[in-house]
Amino acid sequence: HSLAANNMRRSRARLAFLCLLALNAAVGNSSLKELPLFCHKLDCSKYTLVKQYETFEERSYEASHWMTTLVEGLQYEDAMYDGFMRLFKYINGNNVAGEKIPMTAPVLVHVIPKGGDLDKNFTVSFFVPPASMSPPKPLDSRIYLDSHLAQTVYVRSFGGYMEKSDFVANADALEEDLKAAGKSFNEKYYMSAGYDSPFRPLNRHNEVWFIAV
């Protein structure tokens, strides 16, 4: 029963990505040639690569804005689906302007463990490009505009379809590598970043982030 439930959650999350990319792929910004290839010509949060280490990158991100929703009390797969669909509806017209908004990358999931329990609280976020600094107000009161200051981020990249076990394992590995390298970072939370639709079975790009302090 647990396996069937997990498969159902994964299918629902992937269906959400499929619907979103099918509706929005045609309106990505194809002029952003300076962005990494894994952004797939979508508006993408901008950064400068500070240093490439053997197993991780140190990046300097510009200040940015994100449309964000908090999901509480659900496991990762369910939280991802619920949060993603709220934002999916928002960019497809569930806002005061009735406006359809182009897809951006990455989809950022902020993992907020409580008492060491991963499956408690998450925020799911879509990047707001600089050209859209006044996005229309959401009709869903659970969605809000969040601001990130310019920050240094430590990033570990990995492939495949991002399941909970994958990003947890990669976050653990990144944490170990950062400590071994003597890096100072916020250990209270981390983020997962996804860049691909289910249309892309190979050469997928996922990331886990820790914020430098």
Image: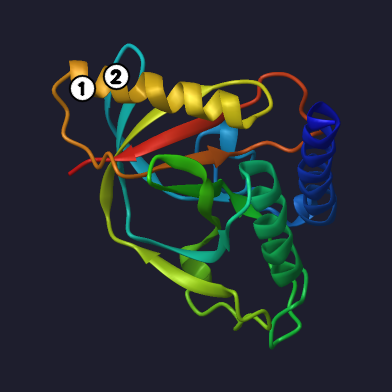
Coordinates of residue 185 in the picture (x, y in percent): 22, 38
The reply to whether dot 1 and dot 2 touch (C-beta < 8 Å) is: yes
Q: Secondary structure at mark 1?
A: helix
Coordinates of residue 108 in the picture (x, y in percent): 53, 48
> In the rendering, which numbered label is found on residue 176?
2
- Which residue is drawn at the image coordinates 77% and 23% (left, top)? 201
Coordinates of residue 119 in the picture (x, y in percent): 55, 44
Q: Is residue 128 left or right of residue 197?
A: left
In front of the other: 25 or 93: 93
162 to 189, vertically: above or below: above
- Which residue is drawn at the image coordinates 56% and 77% (left, top)? 135
To which residue does mark 1 refer?
179
124 to 133, vertically: above or below: above
Coordinates of residue 6 in the picture (x, y in percent): 77, 33
Residue ranking furthest to the top: 54
Q: Gap in Å between the C-alphas at discs 1 and 2?
A: 5 Å
Q: Quadrant of residue 9?
A: top right
Q: Is residue 194 left or right of residue 82?
A: left
> In the rendering, which numbered label is found on residue 203?
none
Residue ranking furthest to the bottom: 96
In front of the other: 96 or 111: 111
Residue type at numbered disc 2:
Glu
Q: Is residue 65 left or right of residue 165?
A: left
- Which residue is drawn at the image coordinates 17% and 44% (left, top)? 213
152 to 28, vertically: above or below: above
Q: Quadrant of residue 147?
A: bottom left
Residue 34 at least partly seen: no
Residue type at numbered disc 1:
Lys
Q: Is residue 178 left or right of residue 169?
A: left
Q: Secondary structure at mark 2?
A: helix
